[in-house]
Amino acid sequence: MTIKVSAICTSEATLAALNAPDPTRTGVVFAAHTGSVQTLASVLRKDQPDVVLLDLPVSDEQAMEQIEAALMKAPGTHMVLVSPDRSVEFLTRVMRAGVREVLPEPMTPMTVQQAVEHAQGHTSISSRHRDHVGQVLALIPAKGGAGSTFLATNLAYALSKQGKRVAVLDLNLYFGDVAIFLGDKKVVSSVVDLARQAQRLDSALLDSSMIKVSDHLHVLAASESPEDVNEVSPAGLEKIIELARSQYDFVVLDVSNTLDPVAVKVLDLADTIYLTLQLSLPFVNAAKRMVAVFRVLGYLSDKLSIVVNRYEKGGDIDLPDVEKATMLKIGRTIPNSHLAVNASVNQGIPLLEMAPRDPVARALHEWAQELAPIAVPPSKGWLHGLMKPLA
């Protein structure tokens, strides 16, 4: 597969370095230009690249608007900024402008190589899907308190009871607690530990890093040291998720609602994104904003599904209100069963195991059954039942 890559840098020295022969650039049609954000639109129009890198030493709102306007005319382009700014405000703004990745300055041939590797992984996703390797399901809350982690872990458990091999990855990197929802087994290794070793990652290392909840359900926990989270890169997480996809029938991602470049890469890789919320105005308002960001990121409606948790009829806000605000159909509702769910969480026992007849447990079972149907053998009728003892 050949990828067209364009780079816009701010100095002639950088231009010369980028244009120097590079034997690692196999399968890449590369073009470098000097310029600034004002050059972006013309480069996109003339080069029509799959990937474009832009040197952005200083950013302001005008620059963001120019980037956003240029990318609206080239929605399929993988946009990479090279910038010294790593603030949350900056990363959030560029993501909303349609930028896929932010790499640290200066722009070098290594920067280009890194961007190409990330983009190649992204563009090859569709071919991997055609091979029908494991499905990747991302659950993300519209805001904190939606019950997203409970749904992710208990859906994973329900899928494992369908006989599927399931991995849960705790990608709430700062304060993830997936592991305690599924028991009290000791954390073997974390997402951060595995991301540090991404270069030597293989199936054996992945398997040895997992908490074995059961033969069919494994968990990769979040780190207990949030200060190490900055060691997790989008490329490292991509390798973990894609390897897990090849080893499991389902990979369930518990994602935080902090949409930084790492989270965006995770959502890029998901086959389905389940946006979880409850029927209150703050949740609906947050969901509306998040869906708007998803659309900027190029996610189509068939990739997005809204899950209403703790659903009860007759409230001030109903399901049509959510659909009107988000312009998405409700994919699923999970009933309210506060006492049973709390007991499940507090004891670290999946609800399907603790109270299989609870309405929430039944809803989770139905969800898993839709994702991984179990064929029921056809009935052979009453006559066969009478004849069987004679036989």
Image (tube, helix red, strand yellow):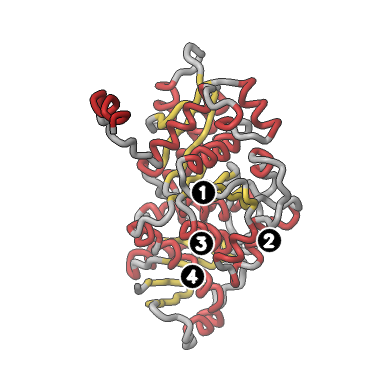
* Disc 2 element: helix
> Can you identify the residue that label 3 sits on?
243
Query: Tag 2: Cα neighbours inside 10 Å, few (<14), some, or many (≥20)?
Result: some
- The answer to whether mark 1 and mark 4 are in CB contact below 8 A is no
> Can you identify the residue that label 4 sits on?
117
Q: Earlier in the sequence, mark 1 or mark 4?
A: 4
Above-or-below relation of 145 to 91: above
Q: Earlier in the sequence, mark 1 or mark 3?
A: 1
Q: Amino acid at mark 3?
A: Leu
User: Where residue 236 sits: x, y (%)?
Assistant: 58, 63
In the orientation shown, which residue stands out farthest toward the top? 314
Q: Earlier in the sequence, mark 1 or mark 2?
A: 1
Is residue 176 visible in the rendered image? The answer is yes
> Can you identify the residue that label 2 sits on?
193
Spatial CA distance of label 2 from label 3 is 15 Å
Q: Amino acid at mark 2?
A: Asp
User: Where residue 195 sits: x, y (%)?
Assistant: 63, 62
Q: Amino acid at mark 4?
A: Glu
